Image (tube, rainbow, N blue to C red):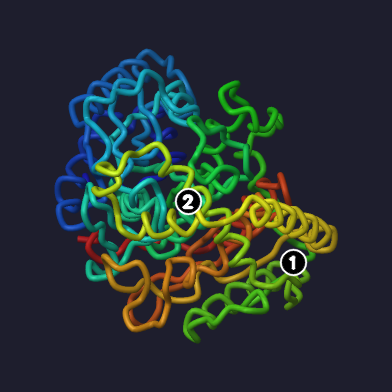
Amino acid sequence: MSSELCFLSATDLLAAYRARRLSPVDVTKAVLAQIERLDPAINGFCGVWADEALAQAKASEARWIRGAPEGRLDGVPVSLKDLMMVKGKPTGRGSLTSSDSDIAADDAPSIARLRAANAVFLGRTTTPEFGWKGCGDSPRTGITRNPWNLDRNPGGSSSGAATAAATGMGCLALGSDGGGSIRMPAGFCGIYGLKANYGRVPAYPASAYGTLSHVGPMTRTVDDAALMLTVMAGPDTRDWQSLPDAGVDFTQATAGGVAGWRIAYSPDLGYAKVDPEIAALVRKAAEKFSAMGAIVEEVSPGFANPLELFRIHWYAGAANLMRSFPPEKQALMDPGLLQIADEGARYSLMEYMEAMGEREALGQHMKRFHETYRLLLTPTLPLPAFEAGEEFPVDSGMTRWFDWTPFSYPFNLTRQPAATIPCGVTSGGLPAGLQIVGALYDEASVLRASRAYEEGTTFLPPPMART
């Protein structure tokens, strides 16, 4: 029974609390036991706050017993990515340069809202150093492993968040995404992940990678992502680019299906090479939208690979980050991060300004594209999860992590909402993901389409979590 509690959705937990069928204390104890059982092999948590979580759960239980819950997540277990500030806690950021004595005075906006909703904070989840790459290892916390195959990479940078949600080590997980950092690990680990529109969930302090970085939920169900996004969305004065309150309860936006919608499907964005087995699973997923009544057209969105454009923005962000660290601190860092920072420092002001103009043109292009198509479907990733502890597949000829993630970074550049949803398992037993990209500001359509696709499917936990 205790392991079954770990895989209940937030929506189901709240209904069970309301009906007095379950207690937040029993659920939290079950999830903490799941972490104790599974995480030594996975290394998805870099800090577990068991005593505090149980205290929060007991306070929640008392509120439910009184019939007076407070907040929309009262008693729901959540994990927090170790890039965001938590009041009274240090922030490791996957870096040996971080100090345990550097205690945050405030919560990051997303965490403040989860706290106000009375979610139960389980602890910190792992990330590569400062979230710089799409893999699951860092100098501070070592290698995080994919629960579907411990020899494989979970993806990153929301590495531990994805493993936690996939294995029942928490119902909800908080992630961030600067070039795919929610969608890549969610795709590799077989869960749902939503990169909300830029500014929908405010961020503070700002990411080193600036306006590329989005905050969003990582969950096992679409309804849970909608609930979590609703809790976290809205402006914050600390983030001057946060969006005004849209007045949308995203939990009310998931119903209705996609019948009559005009949807684009691109198997390769016109430039990506995709593993044949992944391609077949994603094509089958796209065909389901036709079966649900959508008008699905196979079409390229019509832009060239913006890799160099992304590279300039990403490397320049890393170079700017390095300015705050003296040489003795930099000596402790991931060599790959130092390499991209060094390259980023070589870009001229004119090269960066030109890249900003190209980014604007790409965003305008996609705005026009979505005047015709409500959504764009693509693979989330072009390949199944590769070796753990590696930045890119061994003997692949690749040189950096973004060489294997051609479907995610374009939509960080354009700031659009994009989600990944599981769409099958390869013959090698590894998950594949379907990416659903929405027009600027239109998370509601992404969630609604995701929910329609999810209908009739069952979340499949990795084998190690089924026993």
Q: Is residue 7 visible?
A: no
Q: Nearer the viewer, mark 2 or mark 1?
A: 1
Residue 369, located in which quarter of the rendered image?
Answer: bottom right
Position of the C terminus by quadrant: bottom left
The residue located at (75%, 76%) in the rendering is 299
The numbered disc on residue 221 is 2
Mark 2 crowdedness (10 Å alpha carbons): few <14, some 14-19, many ≥20:
many
The numbered disc on residue 263 is 1
**Which SS class for mark 1?**
strand
449 relative position to 77: left or right: right
Residue 259, located in which quarter of the rendered image?
Answer: bottom right
Mark 1 crowdedness (10 Å alpha carbons): few <14, some 14-19, many ≥20:
many
Identify whether 151 is placed above or below 439: below
The numbered disc on residue 164 is none
135 relative position to 177: left or right: left
Residue 156, located in which quarter of the rendered image?
Answer: bottom left
Residue 94 x %, y %: 29, 45
Residue 414 x %, y %: 68, 54
